[in-house]
Image (cartoon, grey):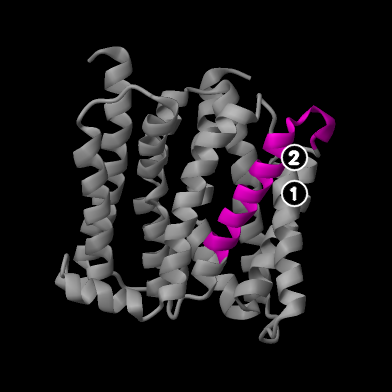
Amino acid sequence: MNQKRATLIGLIAVLLWSAVVGLIRSVSEGFGAVGGAAMIYTLSAVLLLFTVGFPDLRRFPRAYLILGSLLFVSYELCLSLSLGFANTGTQAIEVGMVNYLWPGLTIVLSVLVNRQKTSLMIVPGLLIAIAGIGCVLGGERGFAAAHIVGNINSNVLSYGLAFTGAMIWAIYCVVTKKIAQGNNGITLFFILTAISLWVKYLLSPQPEFTLTIATTINVVLAACAMGFGYAAWNIGILHGNVTVLATASYFVPVISALLATFILGSALTVTFWQGAAMVSFGSLLCWWATRAAETGT
């Protein structure tokens, strides 16, 4: 496969992932937070079995098999449930934006753990991303501490899960790069996530499914976005232009908000869009700080 085609496939993955926030939320409105997520990850796992295949676990380092599984499943549970437990569609979009702190956190953690070279630009980059989240949570009032705290207190569970997920995914990205030894356990991880969600569904009271044509379509679309997204990204990273793909991935917060607005029919404030842009720009600045340090520019 030539590089341009592989890069294009990788960019498609960025678009697919950007639709996940809106689709997961729409599915939860019909099947509940836990049941909807369980259905999405089950179907995604089936799709990955046919596209990526099931890995040879005998080749997996034990550390990657155990720690990678634990971190991945924990992150996916935090992501899906944080969106599903949001009070409204608009809040789900805000929760999704909190999750997108992970790129900046990943770079910072990589600098601390892997001693990756960086410049001082990483500091304003991280601060801009965090300030962007503040603007998102502040609503029309912008970066207003009292309003931000009040918004978080209105649904501590969702916002807490989203932030925890961002931290877990940053750790996953840094740790698995060191211990995976080139192995890809994505199919196994999705299967484990689906099993975990079904266990939770069976062991706790859940709302009844509202099965309609619309909710069924949303489940299929969400599963395709996640399953094919990972498969497409894998092709892009292996055979495409990694620099182009890395740059494009930092615009996911803005693209995700745009698609979620369309899917959920939510109206977002100008301040929200400013905050979303700050999250993307701050994360991109963190990435640029490491690139500049490595190239000496």
Of residue 249 and residue 129, the one placed in the foreground of this image is 129
Overall secondary structure of the magenta section:
helix
Q: Dividing the picture into quarters, in which one does residue 89 lie? A: bottom left
Viewer-closest of 207 and 229: 207
Q: Quadrant of the C terminus?
A: top left
Q: Secondary structure at mark 2?
A: helix
> Residue tagged by mark 2?
51
The amino acid on which the numbered mark 1 sits, given as a three-letter code, is: Leu
Q: Is residue 132 left or right of residue 230?
A: left
Above or below 85: residue 38: above
Which numbered circle lies on residue 47?
A: 1
Residue positioned 37% across, 30% down in the render: 111
* Residue occupying the point 24% across, 40% down: 125
Residue 284 bears which disc, if any? none
Horizontal and vertical percent position of residue 10: 53, 34
Identified by mark 2, the residue type is Thr
Residue found 62% across the figure and 78% down from its top: 32
Residue 67 appears anywhere in the view: yes
Per the rendered image, the range of residues in magenta is 55-80
* Relative vertical location of residue 182 with respect to residue 176 in this rendering, above or below: above
Magenta span contains residue 79 = yes
Q: Are marks 2 and 1 in contact (CB under 8 Å)?
A: yes
Q: Where's residue 258, x and y in %?
A: 37, 59
